[in-house]
Image (cartoon, rainbow, N blue to C red):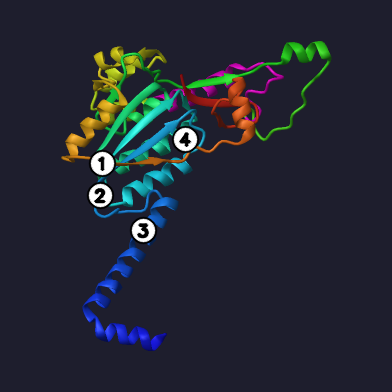
Amino acid sequence: MQNNRLHFSQKHPLLFGFFLIFTAVALLVGAMAFFHFFRPDFGPWFGTSRIGMLHIRGTITESRRVNDWIGRLRRDDSVKGVLVRINSPGGSVAPSQEVFQAVQDLAAVKPVSVSMGAVAASGGYYVACAGSPIWANPGTLTGSIGVKLQLTSFKDLADKLGIREQSVTSGPLKNAGSPLAPLTSEQQTYFQDLVNDLHDQFVSDVAEARGLDREAVLDLADGRAMSGRQAQQVGLVDRIGSREQALMELKDRLGLDGDVELVEGPELKKSLLSRVLGMAGVLPGSDIRLGPQWTLRYEQ
């Protein structure tokens, strides 16, 4: 068999050369198809220009998966720009800040536009401010710039059941917010100062990112939610339009013609339990757990 093959290559060198080239190209295409299937972020795909799609979905409880995806989009030279699609009522303070910073870093190296879906409020709006322009539908629920601290008290019920709390702490504020004890004036001041500081960070970041006067943002930062149309009137949103309109505008901005590949992520993964709870409407909110009894949120 080897002799026949050598004989053929010697007898038809040109045809044999074409066969080798065809085989090499087929292997290369197969390898790239393999990586493209199992690694959607793998690029470039024969020089095709691509637009990244970053999804911010649901309550913002952590930032790792989203920020890992942002890092992939930033490093992929075939991704020319990114559209951030937000459907989020807000969430925990620190993760919202981490995603905001990651989107800002991405916008420093390639164009980033933002499209709001049904809701992009509080922490969701915080993230939106990292990109420009911000698109919203007229009926998008957005704004809600503020911080909420929730404390739950079971003291009256505990008294009826004869339950008494006994705590040994290293300081007077360590047990602040206990559901079995009323807040002291010192504890109320402590919590209010904490909320005010987080609120100040939120307002400052929005004002700087949007290029707005801080006092103007502060006037709007009383926790109020507003429609996309109202948000545009006060400068929190740039344009009214759909996801498709935002995508077309970004495509034109990048000077891309013809078909453009969309690279979307991060992949949405839900456990069976979370799906069941989500259908029942009893998923827990996204909180910053600063202690065992109380939480802080950026949420609508």
Q: Quadrant of the N terminus?
A: bottom left
Q: Secondary structure at mark 3?
A: helix
185 inside magenta stretch: yes
CB contact under 8 Å: marks 3 and 4: no
Q: Residue at x 37, y 28 (%)?
A: 126
Report the disc number at residue 32. 3
What is the CA distance from the residue labelled 2 to the residue labelled 3?
13 Å
What is the CA distance from the residue labelled 4 to the residue labelled 2?
37 Å
The residue segment tinted magenta is: 174-201
Amino acid identity at mark 1: Val
Chain-order first, disc 3 or disc 4: 3
- Image quadrant where residue 106 sits: top left
Q: Residue at x 49, y 37 (%)?
A: 268
CB contact under 8 Å: marks 2 and 1: yes
- Image quadrant where residue 224 sits: top left
Amino acid identity at mark 2: Thr
Q: Residue at x 77, y 15 (%)?
A: 158
